[in-house]
Amino acid sequence: MPNLTDTPHPVPAPIPGVSGCGHWLDRMLSPASVAIVGASGRPGRPGYRVQRVLREHGFAGDIWPVNPNHARLGEDACYPDLSALPSVPDLVVVAVNSRRVEAAVGSAIDAGAGGMVIFSNNFIEQDATPRLLERLKTLCRNAGIPVCGGNGMGFYNYDAQALVSFDSPPERPAGHIALIAHSGSVMTYLANTDPRLMFNLVVSPGQEIHGTVADYIQYALCMPGTRVVAVFMETVRDPEGFVAALSKAREIGIPVVIVKVGATEQGARMAASHSGAIAGDDSVFQAICDRYGAIRVRDMDELAATALLLSQKHRPGPGGLSSLLDSGGLRELMVDLASDFGVTFTRLSESSRDQLGSILEHGLIPDNPVDAMGSINADVARTYSRCLDILGSDPGTAMVSLEFEFRDGFSHYPALLEVARRWRIESDKPFVVINSTSRADNNLEALELGRCGIPVINGISPALATIGNAFRYRDHRMYPLADTPSIPEAIRHHEAKILETGNMGEAETLSMLCDFGLPVVEFRPAKNARQALEAAEALGYPIILKSARPGLLHKSEAGGVMPDIRTRDGLLDAYGELSVRLGDEVLVASMLGDGVELAFGMVNDRQFGPVVMVSAGGIHVELLDDRRFIKAPCSVEEASYHIRSLRIFRLLDGCRGRVPCRTDLAAVALSRFSEVAVALEDLVLEMDANPVIVTPHDCRIVDAMAIGMDSG
């Protein structure tokens, strides 16, 4: 099971009578009253800024500054301490330095506060043990009081008009993007810079004293205005809660878009199996995202653009992108780049092409993408409007994009802005306006279009990356998740006895997988030449001879594999050579026909439990960057999706005249392998099945090994 020692809390039951969405964070994130410990009359102080920001952004509740040196601060009466407040505060903002924060937190708990925001970094010199941060976590978790921070920027709840921060964002209406960012700087960069981005919630969890990224995702999912959740995260402190949050998001159809930093850090453990050697922390995190359809993106720009596109109320159905442009050259550029981002264009029906041909100027190609820009005249708007209608009505269209040049205060064809607004009102297809350069100065026009529900993305590559992300989210939701597997206990107990002794050799692992119902090549163990000959005669030539020396984990690297042996004499020669170099114990196995090699692997992650891998197999498993990691267990449909995403799938699918291989059988085998990984998660640390040979007629595991938990 996942290691939950760092999970901060069981989620408390909703608090009766609290406004908001009934979540345990309600009193903190949707407060009716805010007390500010460390309130100040000095403009440079955080306590001063928090009070000003609440007032400036229309907070309708009570604001209670707390400072024994003042009777009033600004418009508000000031109180000497929390015990003097007229009633129990929903939220206490702790705007004091690290040396004073512990006492302030204790006072907030004693006052019965519903939550706290802590700005301080909670590190002090010559601190006692446990350190201040750990003491604060213990205090707040024992009290069951949520905390936003420390070392964060607070939060903006636009739906509740509760902006609690010492940083003041620009005025903007409530939108449909919930942003959760470990980094306070990322929070302010995204929330304060681009007016196209409109949020209903922005949170800086910081040190997650009591309240994790998972909790804030769950809260955002409860908010009726949320259409997409954008996350910038440094670590997962609550694995079980994080999985539950992503699962809930998938269930209700709200996409979660994530930038996860630290992707290049690999686990420190030296792994014995191929899959263990390959699976770094980021591979496992990617598997969790893939399982629940969370969208991994590379940077803040892609995070913002993807959230912007998915914040509109229309989502892509089946089909591809239909795109209308104002340039033949840009049309060609879009076609050249689309495959890099996984974007496919709609193959228009004959009727759609005929309709386009009837309205486009001579020389323009009536096919998708469409360059509709002929002569600049009064017919431009009418032509583009009709083209949009044709593209949007085509049965293969999942999304429509309109690309044209516009800047604030100028466009060669300003009527196209009105065309876009009209089409947004009349169509239920997702729609995006693109300016081909990311350097376009069009913030004001983009903001106006955004208020009409039209996202504007500057730059062909950013736009295609974003559209590709939307299509991948759609595709993820098309396959079902696997049920918890049921493995016969008698088989499990039989194999447990072997695994308790440590590593399992090839014969034992193949036998185990066979017991679990996986397709395994026929084989016989042998300890001398006579037994090897008997095994070969029973299996039938050609055969493959492999060393079975105990502890030999990677046979190919040690020269322990002798393939395609077709005669008795050839077998005796091969056995003699192997026995001299690697010992008498061998495995005799049937040779399979020509096929494509895959590899299955399993690692038992300390946070998220068993994760399986599918990749190019044989000697290429570690050489080629062609692999996918999948949270176990996975359904057959999910397994098929990941197999099809491999680059080697082109070989499996029969490129260059080859007969297609039985990838359906490979998907069934991978799904079953993932069930075995779950059944043995408390016994197996790592497991490999490599190669798994997929032919036009069959799928068989040829070699396998397992590393017992005690070996790690």
Image: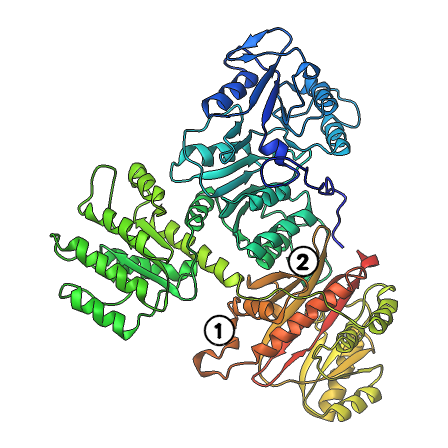
Q: Which residue is mark 1?
A: 650
Position of 387 with respect to 204 (left or right) is: left
Looking at this view, is 278 or 495 the one in front?
Answer: 495
* Amino acid type for the residue under numbered disc 1: Arg
State the image coordinates of residue 108 (x, y, percent, origin top left): 70, 23
Position of 301 with respect to 202 (left or right) is: left
Q: Residue furthest front?
A: 17
* Amino acid type for the residue under numbered disc 2: Ala
Q: Where, quadrant-wise, is the N terminus in this rendering?
A: bottom right
Instruction: Assign a secondary structure to mark 2.
Output: helix
- Would residue 616 be seen by someone viewing this image from the given angle? no
State the image coordinates of residue 258 (x, y, percent, origin top left): 54, 47
Q: Quadrant of residue 154?
A: top right
**Eye-nearest disc, 2 or 1:** 1
Query: Residue at image x 22%, y 57%?
Result: 385
Q: Quadrant of residue 322?
A: bottom left
Q: Where, quadrant-wise, is the C terminus in this rendering?
A: bottom right
- State which tag comes first along the sequence, 2 or 1: 2
Position of 588 with respect to 391 (left or right) is: right
State the image coordinates of residue 642 (x, y, percent, origin top left): 56, 66
Query: Residue at image x 66%, y 37%?
Result: 211
State the image coordinates of residue 400 (x, y, percent, origin top left): 34, 58
- Would residue 438 be seen by someone viewing this image from the given angle? yes
Q: Which mark is drawn over residue 542? A: none
Q: CA distance from mark 2 to mark 1?
A: 26 Å
Position of 523 with respect to 184 (left or right) is: right
Q: Which residue is mark 2?
A: 277
